[in-house]
Image (cartoon, rainbow, N blue to C red):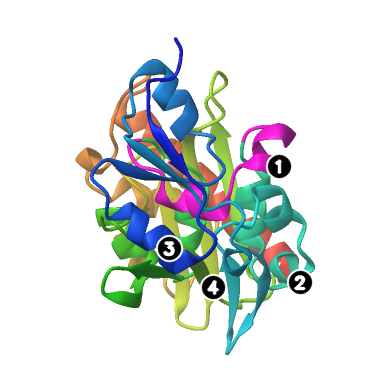
Amino acid sequence: MILTDFDYARPAALDEALALLATPGARVLAGGQSLLPGLRTGAERARLLVDVRHLAELRGVGRAGGSLRIGALTTLAELAAHPLVLAEAPELAAAARANGDPQVRNLGTAGGNLAAAGRATDLPVAALAADARVELAGPAGRTTLTAERLAASGVPAGSVLTALLVPAAGPAAAFEKAADRATRYPLCAAAVRVTPDGPRIAVTGATPRALRLRGVEDRLRGGPYTTEAVLAAFRAEPRELFVPGRGTSAEYLGHLAGVLTARALARAALSTA
């Protein structure tokens, strides 16, 4: 199919972009990896595309207090290879590296992956395990949300996701994924961070959306993080937490989530040894 009719604007500054996004039917264009195919198939609608790809303030990786600040227009390829991210938020780097193929990673953005609605993507689950926050700019000014809140409610209408704020963890974090062979989206993905208070564990693909699994975290608090202990912790979760589909059962997905979490915890332990 061909693209439907829409208007196009390329604002020179973020404030101009926000003013344009107040137009009914306006959509943000960044990497375009999901939006443009959706417009071609009719799955997405837009009356105005607001192209923010040239706004320098939305790019780059640096430090902000005790966190890493990852600009929303930072590409997945840049995120996967950045020395600060590799050293201090390795689950984010691994999640970015797991996205699609090199062409997708060179065009796709951190913000677009985090804000994707209607499908499981890789960065949200890593952001949840990292206890990250997102910066937003909107009609009421600048604000922040937890990554958990963003996963539950999405980006507010008329707002732009400007950055991801990730507490530095060092190497005690990891990401594992079982990908759908056709789409490379996660059939199931798990991200972990091991903290002095216990592990933080998040899963996506097997669940309705990216979720922190606090019940599993509580059962594993104090260790051990053996495969047997992790799988037992997942078996205690309600089966309805896991959503069957694509030829898989809830039981299978719950087991797969446990296996991937066990692998991630083992990888995090090896990284700190």
Instruction: Quickly name the residue at label 1.
Output: 106
Q: In the rendering, at what x and y percent does residue 6 appear?
A: 38, 30
Helix, strand or loop at mark 4: strand
Helix, strand or loop at mark 3: helix
What residue do we see at 28% from left, 33% from top? 243
Q: In the rendering, at what x and y percent does residue 270 appear?
A: 73, 63
Q: Amino acid at mark 3?
A: Glu
- Distance in Å between CA atoms under marks 1 and 2: 33 Å
The answer to which image quadrant residue 197 occupies is: bottom left
Magenta region, main secondary structure:
helix
| View extreme (top): residue | 1
Which of pointers 4 and 3 lies earlier in the amino acid sequence? 3
The quadrant of the picture occupied by the C terminus is bottom right
| View extreme (bottom): residue | 65
Instruction: Quickly name the residue at label 3.
Output: 16
Q: Which mark is residue 273?
A: 2
Front residue (pair 114, 167): 114
Q: Mark 2, mark 3: which one is toward the viewer?
A: 3
Q: Which mark is residue 252?
A: none
- Distance in Å between CA atoms under marks 2 and 3: 49 Å
The answer to which image quadrant residue 69 occupies is: bottom right
Q: Are marks 4 and 2 in contact (CB under 8 Å)?
A: no
Q: Residues within 10 Å of mark 1 (few under 14, many from 20)?
A: some
First to last magenta residue range: 100-118
Instruction: Quickly name the residue at label 4.
Output: 166
Q: In the rendering, at what x and y percent does residue 185 appear?
A: 51, 32
Q: Amino acid at mark 4?
A: Val
